[in-house]
Image (tube, rainbow, N blue to C red):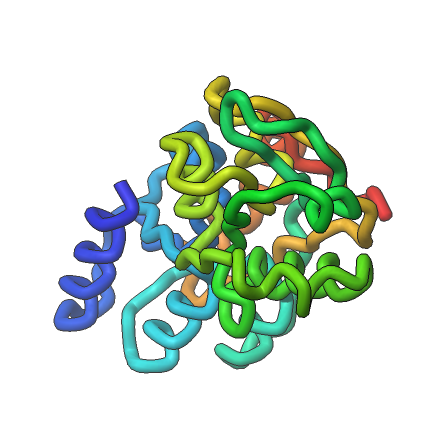
């Protein structure tokens, strides 16, 4: 799914803007929300930083939704918060259940997002640094391109643990455990880049759109 979405993004570079479904460049963790939306759109899914760079290079996106408001500002937009999320620690089937602070006491590799690029990785690093574990765990860390890639590494048993969004953990039944991580909620920010994008953004801010976010485990915009 993600490779197909990235290929779509590359093909769109050469295409002028045209009428039709809105091209929604969105964080990979929004896959289920976009697939469930009752509005005409074409999803292009990847890490937020990757998508921002594609837009800045000329990819004709109609709407950009990032898991970090920073990347919305990078493309020149004023962030509009559409949903919130939280980080969780997950373990592969059979892994010893631990909380974040307990990672230093168990063996095994830990997957996170790219810690210097994609939001899920930046947030994971901040959580590990706050817990005083970043330096100790660095030799055991495996970095992946986005949250769903981290989740896949855990579900196939390539790593023992992973730090993902709570909504990603809800998307599979192939986990040994899910443990909450205490931190500020993750804000998903959007910016419309065309009139079709405005239509889709209005939809996601409407009660119907917010209900889809809630259905997939996202927190409402009003939650702190």
Res. 10 in view: yes
Residue in front for this viewpoint, 113 or 24: 113
**92 horizontally vs 18: left or right:** right
How far across and how far down the image is residue 106, in percent?
A: 66, 41
151 relative to 147, above or below: above
Q: For the point 46% across and 46% down, which residue is it?
A: 150
Res. 164 in view: no
Can you say which quadrant of the picture contains the N terminus? top left
**3 horizontally vs 145: left or right:** left
90 relative to 7, above or below: above
Residue in front for this viewpoint, 129 or 46: 129
Residue in front for this viewpoint, 220 or 6: 6
How far across and how far down the image is residue 161, in percent?
A: 56, 40
**14 horizontally vs 196: left or right:** left
Q: For the point 49% across and 78% down, which residue is it?
A: 75
Q: For the point 23% across and 50% down, which residue is it?
A: 3
- Hey, which quadrant is residue 220 in on the image? top right
Residue in front for this viewpoint, 5 or 147: 147
74 relative to 204, above or below: below
Outermost right residue:
224
How far across and how far down the image is residue 165, in percent?
A: 60, 43
135 relative to 87, above or below: below
How far across and how far down the image is residue 66, in percent?
A: 54, 59
- Hey, which quadrant is residue 217 in on the image? top right
């Amino acid at each position: 799914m993600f490779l197909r979405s990235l290929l779509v993004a590359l093909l769109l570079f050469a295409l002028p803007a045209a009428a039709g479904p809105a091209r929604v460049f969105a964080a990979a963790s929004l896959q289920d929300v976009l697939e469930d939306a009752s509005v005409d759109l074409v999803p292009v899914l990847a890490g937020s930083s990757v998508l921002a760079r594609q837009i800045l290079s000329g990819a004709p996106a109609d709407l950009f939704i990032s898991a970090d408001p920073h990347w919305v500002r990078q493309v020149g937009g004023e962030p509009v918060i559409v949903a919130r999320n939280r980080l969780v620690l997950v373990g592969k089937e059979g892994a010893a259940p631990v909380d974040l602070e307990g990672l230093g006491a168990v063996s095994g590799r830990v997957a996170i997002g790219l810690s210097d690029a994609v939001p899920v990785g930046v947030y994971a690093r901040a959580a590990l640094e706050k817990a005083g574990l970043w330096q100790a765990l660095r030799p055991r860390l495996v970095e992946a391109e986005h949250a769903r890639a981290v989740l896949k590494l855990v579900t196939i048993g390539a790593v023992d643990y992973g730090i993902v969004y709570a909504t990603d953990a809800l998307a599979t039944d192939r986990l040994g455990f899910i443990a909450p991580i205490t931190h500020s909620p993750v804000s998903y920010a959007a910016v419309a880049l065309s009139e079709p994008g405005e239509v889709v953004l209005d939809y996601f801010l409407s009660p119907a759109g917010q209900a889809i976010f809630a259905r997939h485990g996202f927190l409402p915009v009003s939650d702190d």
